[in-house]
Amino acid sequence: MQTIMKSNSFFTRLLDLIAPRTCVVCDNRLAIEEEIICGRCNVRLPRTGYSYDAYENEMAKVFWGRIPVERCAPFMYYQARAASANLIYLLKYHNRPDIGEYLGRMMAEELKKDYFFEDIDLIIPIPLERKRQRQRGYNQSLMIAKGVSDATALPIDTGIIVRKVYESSQTEKNRWMRNENVEGVFQLLQPEKAQGKHILLIDDVVTTGATISSCGQELAKAGDVKISVMSIGFAKH
């Protein structure tokens, strides 16, 4: 397990005295060397361990027969009322893009040990429609992707595919409604940049896989495309 740590500088110590930082999971004060999550909560995160078998785990099977999937690895199991879910809640709804970058780096450092990123050419974060991105101020999937890119040096491309429709939230929808809600919402703009590439799609949480499948199907139109999937959370059924 990799722990991401801040610089243990005098300035950092001074800031911690003036405005103590707290763990986003348990709300206890962070130690000088800790960032975002305290060591105790980090150890207790419900990690999936799916990178050990990135080809046939439960999340990978969600995409079988839907997109040309190569490997899949969610970082942790997601339960809406669990303490660990606060990471995603703050990232999405409380202006904490730093959580996305932190988790992206941490996930990537752990997954690198299982050669998860081998032969991947580029990263595409699942796009947000412009109106929603203006409301939120950033795309949470892009923040995660930036952290992954920092740890792996893989390039990010946000121009190949866009989200053209402002669909309603997926949160309260069942499996069939989720599929219908994202059908045809993505548009492939630069197929020549995706053709023949192994693309890593990144999202915050995978539930039914409807959003990633819709995006992946559009990307597949470029031809000879391979897709891997990475997320912070996986809502196990």
Image (cartoon, rainbow, N blue to C red):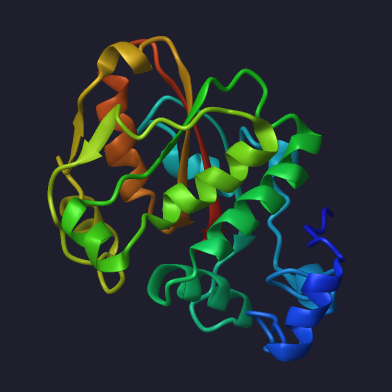
Rendering coords of residue 102 (x, y %): 64, 58
Residue 114 appears anywhere in the view:
yes
101 or 126, which is in the foreground? 101
Quarter of the rendering containing residue 30: bottom right
Q: Residue at x 42, y 9 (%)?
A: 196
Task: Indicate whether 189 appears above or below 19.
Answer: above
Rendering coords of residue 151 (x, y %): 69, 39
Q: Residue at x 17, y 44 (%)?
A: 183
70 or 192, which is in the foreground? 192
Rendering coords of residue 197 (x, y %): 45, 15
**For the image shown, how many numbered marks are present on the structure?**
0
Quarter of the rendering containing residue 206: bottom left
Position of residue 137 in the picture relative to residue 17 (left or right): left
Rendering coords of residue 85 (x, y %): 55, 75
Q: Residue at x 57, y 22 (%)?
A: 120
Task: Indicate whether 192 appears above or below 81.
Answer: above
56 or 93, which is in the foreground? 93
Residue 57 appears anywhere in the view:
no
Classify the position of the N terminus by image quarter: bottom right
Task: Indicate whether 124 appears above or below 13.
Answer: above
